[in-house]
Amino acid sequence: MNTTILTNLVDTLPQFQGYAYPNERTLHPLWGVLIVVYPYITGLVAGAFIMASLVRVFKVRALEPTYRLALLTALAFLLCAPLPLLFHLGHPERCFEIMMTPHFSSPMAMFGFVYAWYLMAVLLLELWFDYRRDFVAWAKTETGLRGIIYQAFTLGVTDVSEPALRLDERIGRVISIVGIPSAFLLHGYVGFIFGSIKANPWWGNVLMPIIFILSAVVSGMALCVFAYMFLCWARRITAEMRCLDLMASFLFFALVVDTTIEGLDWLHRLYSAEEGIDVLRSLATSKLFYTLLIGQACLGTLAPFMLLGTMQLFRRKVAELNRRRVYFASSALILLGVLAMRWNVVIGGQLFSKSLRGFMSYKMELAGSEGWLLSLALLALPFLVLTVLVKYFLARDLPTIENVVPGAAPRGGKPPAPS
Amino acid sequence: MSENMTRRGAIKGLAGIVGGLLALPAARTCKAAVQNGLASSPAPAGYDPFKHKWLMALDVDRCIGCGLCVEACCQENSVPEGHWRTWIERYVITKPKAESGDTRGETFVDSPEAGRNGFPESLIPKEEILKSFFVPKLCNLCEHSPCTQVCPVGATFDAPDGAVLVDKNYCIGCGFCVQACPYGCRFLNPVTHTADKCTLCYHRITRGLKPACVEICPSQARIFGDRMNPVAEDPLERFIANNKVEKLKQSLGTGPRVVYAGLDEEVR
C-alpha cells in the first residue's frame, strides 16, 4: 500500500519543466549514478599512478613510502573500473563485443584497448618488475596459500642476481615513463566520451578531456594521501611527515592547475555566451546548486585550496598533528568534491532538454540498478580489493630478498617499502 | 623447470599472449566487416539498398496536429509505452508586449503524449496568440549521423539507402547513441533493452509501401519518396522545387537530410 502511494507520489511530481522532447521525459536519466561512479573510479586510477610516477620517473625520494601503495591503489581501482559500465549496459552479456568488434569511430570503443593496455602493459608489468625480487623471497619463506600465490607470481623467473635486478629497475622505469601518457590517455578518453557529444552544450567542449585528466590527477593524489594516512592509522604507526608534507604540496599545485582550467572553462562559456548559456546558467544556479556551487566549488575546491594553501605558507608554524588533520580533511574534501564534479557533469548534462527549452528531474532510488545501494557498493568495492592487496603485497612482516637469498642484491639505494 | 626459465623467456611468453589478445579484435573486426555486408534487416530478399535513396519531407503549414501519424507509428512498430519514434510539437508564439519594440512575445512548446491524441485547446487566450503551428518530428536521417559515429560496436549503421538502422541483436544497450542524437529521436527500448528509433518503416518501404505515418497523414504534411527512382510527377521533387526548404540544427554538422518547409526560427 505504502509503496503504491509512494510510486504514485513520485509519478505525480513534475518530471520536467518547460518543454522536453517526448523521449527525454523519462523518470531517470539514461546515464545514471553508475556512469557517475565510472569516471570517478577511472580518474582515481590515473591520479594514483601519476603519484607513483613521481617516485619512479621524477625520483622524488621523499614519496618512496607511498610508491607501492599508490600502485596497488591504482590496480585495485582499475580492476573495479569496468563494473559500473557493465551493470549499466542493457545487454551486459554482449560487453565483449566492445573489445572484439570495436567500431573505431566511437570513443567508447577505445575502452577495450585503453583498459587492456593500461592494465596489462602498464600497471601489471610495472608492479611485476617492482615486486619480482620480493616474490622470489616471499615464495621461499611463506607457506600455504600465500606461498603458492607468491610462487605463481614469480612466473618462474627466480634470477635475483645484481644485473638481473638492475635490469628490472630499468625496465620498470621505462614502463613508468610510458605509463604517464597512458594514464592521461585512460582518463582523457573518458573525458572525450562526454566532450565529443556536440548535441549537448554541457558536455560538448574541447576542454572536457583536459578537465577530466586534471581532476583525475587531483583526486588520485588525494586518494593516495587518504589511503596512506588511513593505512598508518590502522597499523598504529606514524606517517612520515616529510612524505605527507610533500604529497600535500603536490596536491595543492595540482589543485591550482585544475581549478584554473575549470575556471577558464566557465569564463569561456559565460563570455562567449553561446546558444545554450541561459540553460546552463540556470542549471548551475538551480538544479545543480548544491552539488556544483556548494559541493564542487566551495567544499571540494575552495576549502581544500585554502587549507592546503595555508599549509604551504605557514607550514613551519603549524604543529605536526594539526598539519596531519588538515591534510586528511583536505584529501577527504577533494575526494568528495571530485565525486560531485563527476555527478555535475554526468547527471547535470541530462537535466535539461536538448531542445534547450526545459529541465528534467532526477529522483534517485535507494535500491535497483541505478540506486544508492549499488553505487555505494561499487564505490566501496575498490577499497575492499585494496585491503586484500595490501594484506598480501604490502604486509609488514614479509622479508626482503637480501634476508632470504644469500648474495642477492639489495634494492638499489632505495629504502624499503613502508612497514 | 622454473630454474631454467629466464626473464627474457617469460617476457617473450607474455608478449606472445598479449600480442595474441591484441590481434584478436583485428580478426574479429574483419569478420564483422564481412558480416556487415551480409547483415540481416527487415528488408525482403532481393532488395538492393544501393539502388534507393529514401527521403522524407515535412510541410509545416499542412500539419493539423491530429496525431494520426504518431498513433500509426506506435501501432505499426509496437513502440513501447512512453517512447516515440515520431512526434508532433505545437508551437504557440504570443504577441509582443505593447511598446516593447519586440517582434514577438514568448514561445510555448508542448507535445502531450507526443501529440498521439491530438492537442487540447491552448491555455493561452486566443487574443494573445501571434501565431501557432505544428511541427512533426522524426529521425533526421543524418548524413554524418552522430549516433552511428559513437556506437561502440557498430550496431547502429547508415544503410546505403539513407535509413539509419539499429541491429537489435547486436546492440549492447549503452545509450551512447541516445545521448549523441541532438534531435531526441532515439530511446532505449525497455523491452529489448537496446537502442530504438524511426526506421522509416523499413519493413514497408523495402516492399514498395510508404511509411505508416506518411500513409495515414490526412493533410499530406509528410511527403516520402525515393530520390534515386523518382516517379512521374514525383511529389517529393515537386515539394522541394516549390518550397524554400530548411533542415534542423544544421550548425551541428550532422548533415540532416529530412527537409522542412515553413519552419519558424523557434523550431529546434
Image: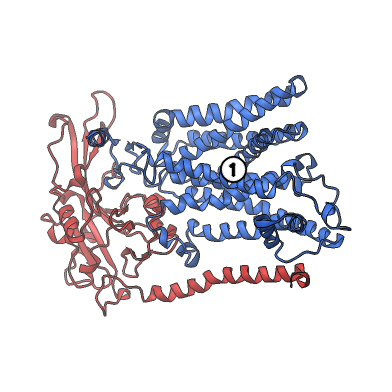
Q: Residue furthest top?
A: A317
Quarter containing the N terminus of chain B: bottom right
**Left-right relation of A203 to A5:** right
The answer to which image quadrant residue B106 occupies is: top left
What x and y, as percent, mark residue B231?
A: 19, 72
The residue that disc 1 covers is: A216
Q: Chain of mark 1?
A: A
What x and y, as percent, mark residue B210?
A: 18, 66
What x and y, as percent, mark residue B8?
A: 76, 69
- Inspect the image, locate mark 1, and give the three-letter code of the amino acid beneath it: Ala
Colour red, chain: B
Residue nearest the observer in this picture, B4 or A279 = B4
What tint does the image give chain A? blue
Residue nearest the observer in this picture, B267 or B31 = B31
- Residue B125 visible at all: yes
Q: Residue furthest left?
A: B218
Residue nearest the observer in this picture, A271 or A98 = A98
**Left-right relation of A180 to A355:** right
Which residue is pictured at 54% across the width and 37% down the height?
A338
